[in-house]
Amino acid sequence: MSFAWAKQYEPKTAFTKWMDEKLPLPRLVYSAVGAGYPVPRNLNYMWNFGVLAGFFLVLQIVTGVVLAMHYASNTEVAFAQTEHIMRNVNYGWLMRYAHANGASFFFIVIYLHIFRGFYYSSYKAPREMIWLLGVVIFLLMMATAFMGYVLPWGQMSFWGAKVITGLFGAIPLVGESLQTWLVGGFAPGNSALNRFFSLHFLLPFVIAGVVILHIWALHIPGSSNPTGVEVKKESDTVPFHPYYTAKDGFGLGVILVLFAFMVFFLPNTLGHPDNYIEANPLSTPALIVPEWYFYPFYAILRAFTGDLALFGVTIIPAKLLGVIAMFASILVWFFLPWLDKSPVRSGQYRPLFKKFFWFGLIPCMLALFYLGGAKPEEPYIIFSQIATAYYFLHFLVILPIVSQIEIPTPLPFSITESVLGKDDDGAAQPAE
């Protein structure tokens, strides 16, 4: 984003002038997150989650590198090595708890970031590429988190890997070969653990690269805002620093207090107790579940209990239907910029959309979070099927229809008016 009123970087000392000529890194930082980056003046705390996600990504990389120094990706010793890190490595317990809970907090802020995007239609033009890269980041996060869940080689690690990699076996013709190639055998073992460890170490750096592209794409059209009205003049913006660095700093301080409380007082609350039992291929846990942040998609996977048949002939087996639906539940997000045709971005000015969001999509997602961790029995199965049906109905049917038929409420004339109730000249402006 380029504004005529944006402050330009001016090096003050001989060293900074020399640096600006040879490697203009200070200029880049100044333009990206400093006073040279104007942002809408009306951003609320829902715009904090991008910065918080960046913090937890860095935390995961740093703690992950330290843990990798003491970990051995061998099924014979992986479980014992994890306990060695906890008991014998200086502050190893802190590194592991920070890494494990950091993953949960990373997903918490990302989910909030995504649902803020849903509500304020952050996927609409001209920000489609920002949204698409964000969905790619989420998919990479899920792959990284799944592989990390396998590394402690506890009961849930092994059986979770067996169930999830087994899904590839449902793919017609190539499924079994693909599954064998993925795990390096007919069941998760030493080959699978080595591969998952390598990819778990590599993918966070890939995520960091896509995050850079995500931020780069953001700086072209500029940040969205709660009104959805585009920046029109200088008074609509404030410099990112110090205004939003202070606001983001406050938000970071709040979430760090919560994070520290979890790490020091409730470190295992978000984990599964069966993962403190060493993996045993001959002993199946009573309930096999992934980490909590996979629950909605796991619930969608398990919602399909019957084959798709025609005249008594099975066309698509139930297992394959579940796999297709699970992946489709995320892939549908790629098409939101074209499914939602409303000319208004912000849900604040879309009364019908707001009702379906707060009383439809949000309860549906909360139900899927709960059902994904429940036992695969009635009445949970039928509830999962209802929630899954509504989930796809919301994005593929309700959202396109609502965007065409609803009558939005009047928008403010400018961002300044939305904040002050009047424009620069002191007079209230008519809404568009």
Image (cartoon, rainbow, N blue to C red):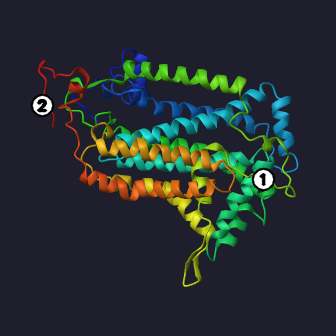
Q: Which mark is residue 36?
A: none
Quadrant position of the C terminus in the picture? top left
Identify the element where label 1 is drawn.
helix
Q: Name the residue type under label 1.
A: Phe
Which is nearer the eye, 313 or 330?
313
Identify the element where label 2 is drawn.
loop
Q: In the displayed structure, does residue 293 sit left or right of residue 136?
A: right
* Mark 2 crowd level (few <14, some 14–19, many ≥20, 10 Å Cα): few
Q: Where in the figure is residue 273, as x and y percent of width and height?
A: 78, 40
Q: Where in the figure is residue 45, as x and y percent of width and height?
A: 42, 27
Q: Earlier in the sequence, mark 1 or mark 2?
A: 1
Residue displayed at 43% across by 21% down: 247
Quadrant position of the N terminus in the picture? top left
Question: For the view shown, which residue lies furthest in the top direction?
Answer: 13
Residue displayed at 57% across by 55% down: 384
Residue displayed at 59% across by 60% down: 303
Q: Where in the figure is residue 351, as x and y percent of width and height?
A: 29, 41
Which is nearer the eye, 10 or 419?
419
Q: In the displayed structure, does residue 45 sit left or right of residue 234?
A: right
Which is nearer the eye, 265 or 247?
265
- Disc 1 versus disc 2: nearer the observer: 2
Q: Is residue 259 above or below residue 380?
A: above
Q: Quadrant of residue 332?
A: bottom left
* Mark 1 crowd level (few <14, some 14–19, many ≥20, 10 Å Cα): many
Q: Name the residue type under label 2.
A: Pro
Q: Quadrant of residue 168?
A: bottom right
Spatial CA distance of label 1 from label 2 is 62 Å
Label 1 belongs to which residue? 158
Q: Where in the figure is residue 350, as x and y percent of width and height?
A: 28, 42
Q: Which mark is residue 430?
A: 2
* Discs 1, 2 touching: Cβ within 8 Å: no
Q: Is residue 224 visible?
A: yes
